Image: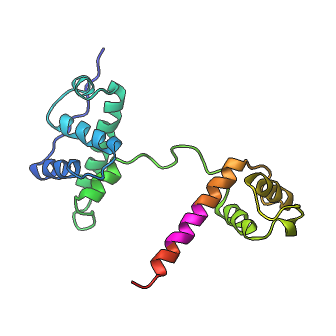
Amino acid sequence: MSRTAISITLSPVEQSLLHTILRRRSLPEFQKERVHIVLAAGAGLRNKDIAEHYPLEVNRVGVWRKRWSIAHQQWHTSDETLRPPMNESLVLQWLADKPGRGRNEEFTPEQRLKIAALSQESAEQNGFPVTHWSAERLAQAAIKRGIVQTISERTVNRILKKTTCRRTEAAIGSMPR
């Protein structure tokens, strides 16, 4: 027994907005895919037809059709004086991943800052017979200080790379032009 897909009706303004979003060069492919799904569903295509046209799984098409429909219906039935205007930002918000997807952060921002601060101290002061930190020794020092229970060299490198990038961006931003 086949189920009937949720019907999507798009106004000319909404269609135009979705086409405008598709023309953005900076739009990631996964978002373009979702916009295509909504436009095709709005044109009356079935999930199976959409999935064949854009090589996707049928259930994935159904997920984005349903999410659009729910968000659009809630927006449409809300008080006109309180609802936000239909714009690119709102549409992309509707077509975004739900919060909580993916792996949770293993280390808190405070732990990351402490590791970055530790890297600014000398290795000799922390009991290592060398003049410069290695990622391995920095990981050992972070564990020894009780900042973290365990941490890999690779994670230490990622933390340092992010904090170095932020510091560089801040320094460039504060330079006179």
Closer to the camera, 170 or 131? 131
Q: How is the image coloured?
A: rainbow
Image quarter where the C terminus lies is bottom left
Q: Is residue 61 left or right of residue 114?
A: left
Q: Give the image location of residue 135, x and y in percent.
A: 73, 54
Q: Give the image location of residue 111, x and y in percent.
A: 71, 62
Residue 70 is a magenta residue: no
Q: Is residue 156 left or right of residue 53?
A: right
Q: Which residues are magenta?
A: 162-169
Q: Give the image location of residue 39, x and y in percent.
A: 19, 40
The image quadrant of residue 6 is top left
Q: Is residue 43 left or right of residue 64?
A: left
| Residue occupying the point 46% across, 77% down | 173
Q: Is residue 139 above or below residue 81?
A: above
Q: Is residue 45 left or right of residue 109?
A: left
Q: Give the image location of residue 117, x and y in percent.
A: 71, 69
| Residue occupying the point 27% across, 63% down | 84
Closer to the camera, 109 or 101? 109
Image quarter where the N terminus lies is top left
Residue occupying the far left of the picture: 12
Residue 165 is a magenta residue: yes
